[in-house]
Image (tube, rainbow, N blue to C red):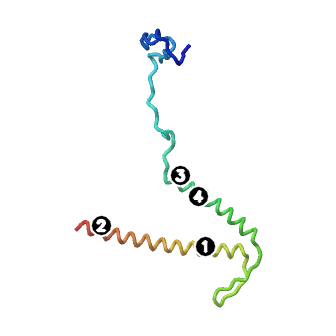
Amino acid sequence: MATADRTPEQKNIPAAAREDDVEPTAPATSRVQPAKPAGADKLPVTKLGRIWTATIFGLIVLILLIIFIAQNQEQVTLNYFAYQGQVNLGLALFFAAIGGALVVAIAGVARVIQLRATAKKRSKAKKR
């Protein structure tokens, strides 16, 4: 039985000889396996896996969008410059969202083209 206070008798006994401090040892035939780093069992992330994830996410968004359009069937009047027309509210908001996405996409493409041109100029300047 181990106690917090060691008697003078226990202090004089070598650590290996004390019965209360002896830890069980592994059999000589067993080998210790090196510890695997955290996440070693995970599969690598691939482009195909990312595409699959993006497809699933896109389908979920599409389903939610269809539900939104189906629930907003009231007719609204849209005025755009000289044009005027009746359309479902859900479709009007959908077209507005697509228009906003196109504006963002055009700005993104312009920025990518600008960055590529700058990179090309720098690489030509380094080769000289």
Q: Distance from label 4 to label 3 (Cα)?
A: 10 Å
Residue 43 on image: x %, y % = 51, 44
Question: Mark number for residue 55?
Answer: 4
Q: Residues within 10 Å of mark 1 (few under 14, many from 20)?
A: few
Identify the residue shown where x is 63% and y is 75%: 96
Type of the residue with mark 3: Gly
Indicate which disc, 1 or 4, sits on the residue closer to the N terminus.
Answer: 4
Q: What residue is disc 3 on?
A: 49
Question: Mark number for residue 98?
Answer: 1
Type of the residue with mark 2: Ser
- Residue 48 lies, with reference to residue 86, above or below; the image says above
Query: Which element type, helix, strand or loop, lies under badge 1?
Result: helix
The quadrant in which the N terminus is found is: top right
Indicate which disc, 3 or 1, sits on the residue closer to the N terminus.
Answer: 3
Q: Distance from label 4 to label 2 (Cα)?
A: 36 Å
Q: Residue 89, located in which quarter of the rendered image?
A: bottom right
Q: Which one is in front in this view, the residue at disc 1 or the one at disc 4?
A: 1
Type of the residue with mark 1: Ile
- Residue 22 lies, with reference to residue 80, above or below; the image says above
Q: Distance from label 1 to label 2 (Cα)?
A: 37 Å
Q: Residue 90, located in which quarter of the rendered image?
A: bottom right
Query: Which element type, helix, strand or loop, lies under badge 3?
Result: helix
Type of the residue with mark 4: Thr
Q: Distance from label 3 to label 1 (Cα)?
A: 27 Å
Indicate which disc, 4 or 2, sits on the residue closer to the N terminus.
Answer: 4
Q: Residues within 10 Å of mark 3 (few under 14, many from 20)?
A: few
- Residue 95 lies, with reference to residue 5, above or below; the image says below
Indicate which disc, 1 or 2, sits on the residue closer to the N terminus.
Answer: 1
